[in-house]
Image (cartoon, rainbow, N blue to C red):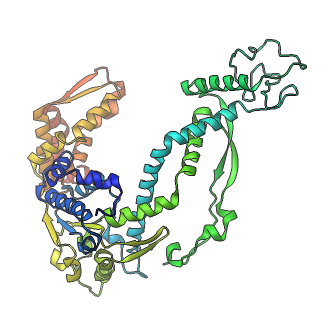
Amino acid sequence: MAIYLPQTTASTTAALTPRQIVDELDKFVVGQRAAKRAVAIALRNRMRRQQLQPDMAEEVAPKNILMIGPTGVGKTEIARRLARLAQSPFLKVEASKFTEVGYVGRDVESMVRDLVEIAVNLVREERAAEVREKARAAAEERLLDLLLPPTSASGGSGGIGYGAGSGSFGAAGLDLPTDDYPLPGTARPPASEPGPDADSHSRTRERMRHHLREGRLDARMVEIETRERSMPSFEIISGSNIEEIGINMKEMLPGIFSGRGRKRRVPVSDAWDILTQEEEQKLVDMESVAKNAITRVEQAGIIFIDEIDKIAGRESSHGPDVSREGVQRDILPIVEGTTVHSKYGMVKTDHILFIAAGAFHVSKPSDLIPELQGRFPIRVELEALGRDDFVRILTEPRGALIKQYTALMTTEGLSLEFTREAIERIAELAAYVNERTENIGARRLHTVMERLLDEISFEAPDLPAKSITIDEAYVNRMLADLVKNDDLSRYIL
């Protein structure tokens, strides 16, 4: 018997083998084969667990991963792309934000509550997409009621009135010629004649609908009523939160939290979007959304704990080390498996996948407390990036920097081309700066590229030439002297 996950997530994950997962990650992250294999196996094991009987599935704990490697080598990007691939709720937190409760920082349980919020938004968007067509149709009917409201005309009931003194038809002031109504400026029906019948009104409404869908009424102004969210000004005792206190303020003070209606005059195009959102909210069952979100967090959630090396080490009597071991002990029950109280309900963390990462320049993984070490059984070391890796990063991924800058310049009508020699020179200079100063990995390419294209980016709107080729000579002119000066490169690159 299959269990737990919504069909969309389960089917997406089940369709990918570990090899296919690595291939997908290769489209965005260069190298780091060991790390990709580790996360691919972890994701596949999650899918395998979903096929087990419930009693056995409860016993299968996720194999959390510890990534070890310098900054800028792809640790975060691998985790983020993995979560997108699996359609899983994903949260990135920094371990240094958490300290012992009562000292400084945030409560470690907040990472789980934040993940639940992300999952709720994710599920809400999915449900809204499912009902969007229905919501848009309902919003269209409301909009037509605003544009062509039924009113009594010439003693009739349910008829349509003419805009008095405006030479326009309808309460919204629309100049729409019809077979049943005269054009602006022509004589109106005598007062003794009955108003348009229901069939005439229906035909006119359909014509109005046709104009609305074609966008011919987008510039018209209509008056709609929107709900304002007004949050009261009050303070909560430090160190506590609404979930811990267990108070539902909306139920206690419904008048304050319900919001007030406010009338606004907006174009028809904006009104349609606003009304569609309101209709979506009516159609989406938030109780079901919250329940589904909690299930998705418990069975498919991924939490990426960055900078875990910053909290490695034993307590000392001075400096920031005073809370390091305390932070580890606070994080431990979350990773081991506990129940966290959120405003949407209780959340179990037993099967959330935790991926921790750190450079471990000063400390070592063995400096973590033994209990926490044991909760990260898979350890992978990511390699530092060199010249050849930078060449691939500049050109191969879907969002490669060269592709990004080329696309940006096309918005100015400028065609930007890089020669192979120029790309290799850029990679060489970036690797050289990393060796001579701080090694910040692929992030160095961002600073180098910005410096390289500084003049072109500034002058692009005024350049007469619409095609520019970046060659090795141009790269040397813009960067070589700067790279040779260590003092300048430390501050600029």
Please determine whether, in this image, residue 119 is positioned above or below residue 320. above
Give coordinates of residue 31: x percent, y percent: 12, 51
Q: Nearer the viewer, residue 30 or 415?
A: 30
Residue under the point 19% across and 82% down: 370
Q: Is residue 81 visible?
A: no
**In this rendering, position of residue 459 left or right of residue 184:** left
Report the residue that reaches farthest toward the bottom.
317
The residue at 20%/47% (across/down) is 24
Residue at 54% x, 76% y: name it. Answer: 246
Residue 142 is situated, as x and y percent measured from the top left of the image, at: 65, 38
Please give the count of numbered marks on the rendered protein.
Answer: 0
Quadrant holding the N terminus? bottom left
Residue 265: image quadrant is top right
Q: Is residue 403 left or right of residue 130?
A: left
Residue 345 visible in the picture? yes
**Relative height, residue 468 to residue 349 (above, below):** above
Q: Nearer the viewer, residue 415 or 179?
A: 179
Side of 380 relative to 51 (left or right): left
Q: Position of residue 151 (x, y in %)?
A: 79, 32
Q: Position of residue 493 (x, y in %)?
A: 22, 49
Hey, which quadrant is residue 255 in on the image?
bottom right
Q: Is residue 297 left or right of residue 74?
A: right
Residue at the top extreme, as displayed: 186
* Residue 200 in the image: above or below residue 488: above
Q: Nearer the viewer, residue 379 or 467?
A: 379
Residue furthest right as drawn: 192
